[in-house]
Every structure is written in C-alpha cells, then in structure tokens.
Image (spheres, rainbow, N blue to C red):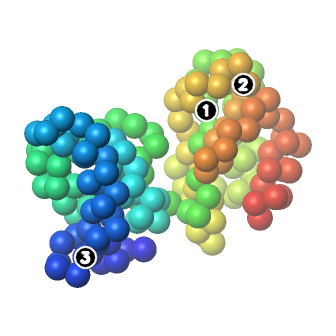
Amino acid sequence: MSDLQLTGAKGQLFNTDIRQQLDDWIAKYPTGQSQSAVIPSLHILQIENDGWLSEPIMDALADYLAMPKISVYEVATFYSMYELQPVGKHKINVCTNISCLLNGSEQIVRHLEKQLGIGLGETTADNKFTLKEVECLGACCGAPMMQVDNDYHEHLTTEKIDQILGRIK
Ligand code: FES
C-alpha cells in the first residue's frame, strides 16, 4: 500500500477507517492530550502502509495529533519497531544484546545472513525478508532469540532457524 491508498475521500492523507482507529486511541486520553496517542497511532499507520512509515505519513500524523512534526520523528526513530524505509513481507529482528551475545547471537546472525543471502539491515531481492539487528527484546531467559513478525523464537540453534525459515518460505 502506498501513501495514496491511505488517502480519504475528502483528500485527507488518512482514510475513514484509519481516522476511526486513530480517534479510538485519542479518546482514551484526556481532552487536549491527543499527542499521548502517538505510539499506537504510528503502529496503526505502519501496518496500513505495508510495514513502514514515510515522512508524509508522519507529518500528517503530527497535524492530526496537534503535535510538532519533530516530536513524531523523535518517537519513530527511537523505537526499533518502527521502520522508516520499505521492508520485506517478513521482518526478522535478531537480538544481539548482552544475554543473546553471550549465548551465541553472533553465530545466529551469521547463519541468518548466509541462509537469506543478505546482511543486517537489508531486504532480500524477492522482498520477502528484512533482517534487522535489535537491542534487548525482553526475552533474555530464552537467549539467543529473534522475533519474526509478531512471534518470538527462543533458544535458537542453526537447525531451529532452518526450520523456522522453511515454514515461512
Ligand atoms: S539480551 Fe536478547 S532478549 Fe534480552
């Protein structure tokens, strides 16, 4: 989906369905505090835009929530869950933080890179996978781990990775 497809009939960047989703979140906060809904709003817009956030979308959200554009950018660039470039159909986040590092995340990354034929931060030519390095995902007891789309996979081995990729491919 492109920015254009987010556009509503009256020419707003967001269509009626998206505006309703945003309004539902805004309604959870006190009047005049619409900027408090920025995190879930970015999440909604990212889903609606094939997994990433463009500048026009973030600018339109800033206007919609009556907050400075720079404040939306600050949130979108702080959290690794937001993408500012197009991504593949499946996003693989590999944790390389301390617990995962001590339990072999370097080998996990090398294996994923070899199996997918891409490096960290890249997307496969068929647009199917994007591979990302991320900070701790809060599953340290399952280290080494990775997140594939919405699912966590823990206690990874190269064999386990092959099974996971095989199921998705
Ligand atoms: S260090 Fe990897 S999940 Fe916490």
Residue 160 seen anywhere in this rendered image of the structure? yes
Q: Earlier in the sequence, mark 1 or mark 3?
A: 3
Camera-side residue of 120 and 38: 38
- Measure the C-alpha gap from mark 2 to mark 1: 8 Å
Q: Is mark 1 within 8 Å of ligand 1?
A: yes
Residue 62: horizontal and vertical position, in percent? 17, 51
Residue 88 vs 115, above or below: the answer is below
Element type at marker 3?
Answer: loop
Instruction: Residue at 59%, 42% (x, y): give it.
Output: 93
Q: Is mark 3 within 8 Å of ligand 1?
A: no
Asked whether, in this view, residue 79 is left or right of residue 164, the answer is: left
Asked whether, in this view, residue 137 is left or right of residue 148, the answer is: left
Camera-side residue of 128 and 147: 147
Q: Are marks 1 and 3 in contact (CB under 8 Å)?
A: no
Q: Check disc 1 and give the amino acid type.
A: Cys
Residue at numbered disc 1: 95
Residue 11: which disc? none
- Measure the C-alpha gap from mark 2 to mark 3: 44 Å
Q: Are marks 2 and 1 in contact (CB under 8 Å)?
A: yes
- Measure the C-alpha gap from mark 1 to mark 3: 38 Å
Q: Check disc 2 and give the amino acid type.
A: Ala
Locate the C terminus and report the quarter of the image it occupies: bottom right
Residue 34 vs 140, above or below: the answer is below
Residue at numbered disc 3: 8
Residue 24: horizontal and vertical position, in percent? 31, 51
Asked whether, in this view, residue 2 is left or right of residue 164, the answer is: left
Residue at numbered disc 2: 143
